Image: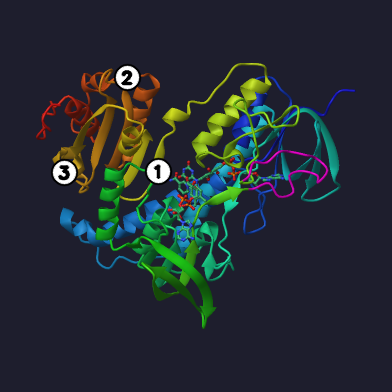
Amino acid sequence: MSKDYDVIVIGAGPAGYVAAIRCAQLGLKTACIDKWLNRDDSAAFGGTCLNAGCIPSKALLESSELYHRAQHEFSTHGIGTGEVTLDIAAMQKRKDGISRQLTSGIASLFKANGVEGLHGAGCIVSTGEVEYTPREGDVKTLSCEHIIIASGSEPTQLPMAPFDGEYILDSWDALDLTEVPGRLGVIGAGVIGVELGSVWSRLGSDVVLLEAMDGFLSGIADGQIAKEALRQYKKQKLDIRLGTRVKGAEVKDGKVEVTFTVKDEEQTETFDKLIVAVGRRPHTDGLIKSDTSLELDDKGYVAVDSSYRTNLPNVWACGDCIGGLMLAHKGSEEGVAVAEIVAGHQAQVNYATVPSVIYTMPEVAWVGQTEEALKSAGVEYRSGSFPFSANGRAKALEQPVGLVKILADAQTDRILGVHMVGPYVSELLAEAVVAMEFGASSEDLALTMHAHPTLSESVHEAALAVDGRAIHALNKKKR
Ligand code: FAD
Ligand code: NAD
């Protein structure tokens, strides 16, 4: 008997919807089931990224940055505006509108590619069988050759500070605030902490970030870059407290009282709102019937081999639910790779060139290995860096802060890592990713002409500096 579909994808975030579209492009009859419901009870494709993550956060980062610049920078340009006012409802309406446009864009892409987009929950009954519970109507059992799990992730809860949606907030709640909190606490000074902390700080909150680790962005960003980013955030009055152990959070008289220790000394802070942003965990609730033995690893991620195969025949997984870097573009690349493999082709993802970006101002962006990782692996390397303070375009933008740093193999000159903090470095990073993907040397970048005046000239100069021949800055002595 023929099956209902060749492929059923469970989850329509950036991993799942991309996998579904690519499957359909490869000629496979594909359905994509997604249970996401927005706060107004509307169903939407796009997962965390489009509804409660990447896109809404970047919309608010842009609005809040403009508000901040209008207040603090316009006069430097000789522009007077009178009193700058804030309409949070309009700001949120714009943000929600962007998400809506993009999520309905996915529904249109599904239609155009012949993917059947199904709103509701998907549950794996067995290999080749998915129980579909639509928002309305009867539960159906759908048959298929292959199942791709792309069920994503959800915020990690702290037992001593459980989310209540009103005072103790997860990142989604924090994106939907309708008033600027006077004092805002954030547990976790990771990527979400500094991005959302920046949004509300620019809009007027006093923001305190309580971070457990003694180092800032330690283990993820290059040490020199993290140090410079921390310096810039502190200048912006983000109060980042490292080495903080949170003991408890209690709601009292419409405020949240947070108790924590720093160097064994107990302290208390009172906030109007508290965001908990201490990482995300895989979302697998309701994904499998209890008698189906899908293997999860010890942290609850769906266990897969290097071809994204789970332990169940013809059941595959990709995106946040399998772990690794929890990034939309990493999930999408995996989605494409799984689709290719399911269709019988070869595919792999190059995890050595996954770009990472923190969208504060200045932005932080990197690809490849950090200086600390190279040192601990005993790799001989040369480094070159260039400050944005010597870049004409950065000065014109009134953003002459930060630097670009390039790390290259001491023998072969192959680029091993590129790390940046500065204006719009999210956009500059693509050049570094392409260079590394093509196995370029720092000399290749140094020999490439860059337009003047652009921020990208800092990448060029950093590449020149690897060989001690930067033109617009003093060079370190050649090693
Ligand atoms: P998700 O986007 O989580 O999608 C999974 C989907 O599966 C959801 O719609 C869920 O409802 C659905 N689902 C789960 N189980 C079932 C089921 N049983 N049946 C049907 N549907 C199901 N990443 C970046 O790269 N850049 C950024 O700037 C960025 N900013 C972020 C900002 C915030 C505030 C947050 C929270 C995250 C951000 N991320 C960012 C991370 C990014 O959102 C995730 O890495 C990405 O969304 C993961 O994609 P995914 O498809 O694996 O999972
Ligand atoms: P994260 O891992 O980036 O940061 C969590 C921080 O919380 C860490 O610094 C950690 O040391 C700290 N922490 C953990 N437990 C703590 C505790 N009990 N007390 C105090 N601090 C504690 O996680 P996140 O910021 O929640 O983001 C989740 C995921 O979403 C990340 O994987 C990130 O990649 C992704 N994301 C990406 C972007 C982007 O690409 N720009 C933006 C937002 C989120």
* Tag 1: amino acid: Ile
Give the secondary structure at mark 3: helix
Q: Which residue is mark 3?
A: 389
Crowding near the residue tagged with mark 1, few <14, some 14–19, many ≥20 C-alpha atoms within 10 Å = some
Residue ID for mark 1: 220
Cα distance between the residues tagged 1 and 2: 23 Å
> Dot 2 corresponds to which residue?
440
Which dot, 3 or 1, sits closer to the camera? 1
Magenta-highlighted residues: 283-298
**Residue at 52%, 81% in the rendered image:** 252
Q: Is residue 30 above or below residue 223?
A: above
- Residue 127 on image: x %, y %: 80, 32
Q: Position of residue 426 (x, y in %)?
A: 35, 39
Residue 465 screen position, x and y as percent? 17, 29
264 versus 380 height, above or below: below
- The quadrant of the picture occupied by the N terminus is top right
